[in-house]
Amino acid sequence: MTETAASHRKPSPTPVDWAAVRADFPLLTRQVQGKPLIYLDSANTGQKPAAVIEAVDDFYRAHNANVSRAVHTLGTEATEAYEGARRKLARFLNVRGDDLVLCSGTTFAINLVAYSWALPRLKPGDTILVSRMEHHANIVPWQLVAQRTGAVVRVAEIAPDGSLDPDALRAAMTPDVKLLAVTHVSNVLGTVNPVREICREARKRGIVTVVDGSQAVPHRKVDIAAIGCDFYALTGHKMCGPTGTGALWARREHLQAMPPFIGGGEMIKEVSFDGTVFNDAPHKFEAGTPNIAGFIGLGAAVDYLDAIGMAHIEAREAELLAHATEELDRIEGLRIFGRAPEKAAVISFLVEGAHAHDLATLLDLEGVAIRSGQHCAHPLLQFFGVAATCRMSLAFYNTHEEIEKFVAALKKARSLLA
């Protein structure tokens, strides 16, 4: 199944009981400001089903030990559960487990590429190409590398609807470009970039590709093998897993050639004062005691998403997005940022005469949680000429009723600011 086909395939005819799915998330039953919580900030972090919470709890209650160090029963159980999570995630992404570096999230993963792959290789005259819509985690590491190597960072611009212009992007892939960093799904605009086609064009030109998958993996079927990138980064806490979890997938030849980013225990085979023999990848990039319980929880999250089916999740979120967009378009003076033909369930918006932070604060009084600000994407908001936006982001556990209540609360907040 290719990435393009996977993202358009229809879910199986077996229906999903979305009310039962929602009941799996304990936090969604709480009240905020004396009102039922309406959580519309899943692009920031996803909520956790009981199965994930219980997996973390069970590890600490019944199996707590360090991994890859002890031969006693607890150590063996912990190691098997931890490595089992790696295998689950690898299957979920259609990659090999020994090409998957477990780390704290996308930010760490991209920095690993920056310091272990780019820093030793780039030089003056080389270019790092990034898109205008990147999260700071896919901008700042490249700026730091450029400062130290003499390379430059160049920007691939976007169209007014928030999509990448494929012709302009191809034209920007000049011979001096050695690395292309692009998001799979924009955290602000919801734009779904055609990463398979982008990576194919880059590969023709010998350009190494880094894909930020933070906002893609929780919401659609991602087949990394079909995408054809060199590196793919993802974050666990956005896909119903615990915070402090994530992964970097990399082509085997890169992992073998890259030096370790951090030194310490577990990432070695042998240490003497004369030198060190490093462990094989991916373990040579996993120094120190990892977030064992977190990754066991992430494995449970993968199981949970798999049980629902990513095709079902994508279809459900597309329905919610269409409903929310239709309702917001009826509000006079409301501007939506990002109307690419293919987008995920993220809507950034402003209401004329109202500051984003004021709107978000008033919505919180109604029990509605959205994000306001620059969303770690300052250059993107500069493109649109705004200082901040509100962002409502949906997940499969949201409901159509919540959208109606959100719109009613938004209208009430606007009237108070008029």
Image (spheres, rainbow, N blue to C red):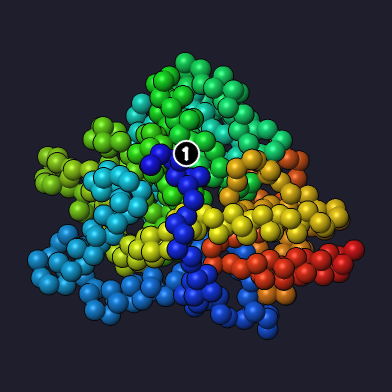
Q: Where is residue 352 in the image (x, y as percent from the top left)?
A: 85, 53
- From the image, which quarter does the C terminus lie in? bottom right
Amino acid type indicated by mark 1: Thr
Where is residue 305 shown, x and y percent of the image? 41, 61
Looking at the picture, tell me which residue is in the foreground, 122 or 43.
43
Find disc 1 in the rendering and name its residue: 4
Closer to the camera in the image, 371 or 401:
401
Residue depicted at 49% across the width and 75% down the height: 20
Q: In this view, does 17 lie to the left or right of 340?
A: left
**Residue drawn at x 34%, y 43% as measured from the top left:** 249
Q: In what quadrant of the picture does the N terminus appear?
A: top left
| 258 or 124: nearer the viewer | 258
**Horizontal arrangement in the rendering, residue 230 relative to residue 75 (left or right):** right
Residue 304 lies, in percent from the top left, at 39, 65
**Would you say 34 lies left or right of 82 here?**
right
In the displayed structure, 135 sits above or below 19; it is above
Left or right of 390 in this view: 232: left
Residue that appears at 51% across and 21% down: 173
- Examine the rendering and report whether any part of residue 371 can be seen: no
Q: Is residue 15 above or below residue 233?
A: below
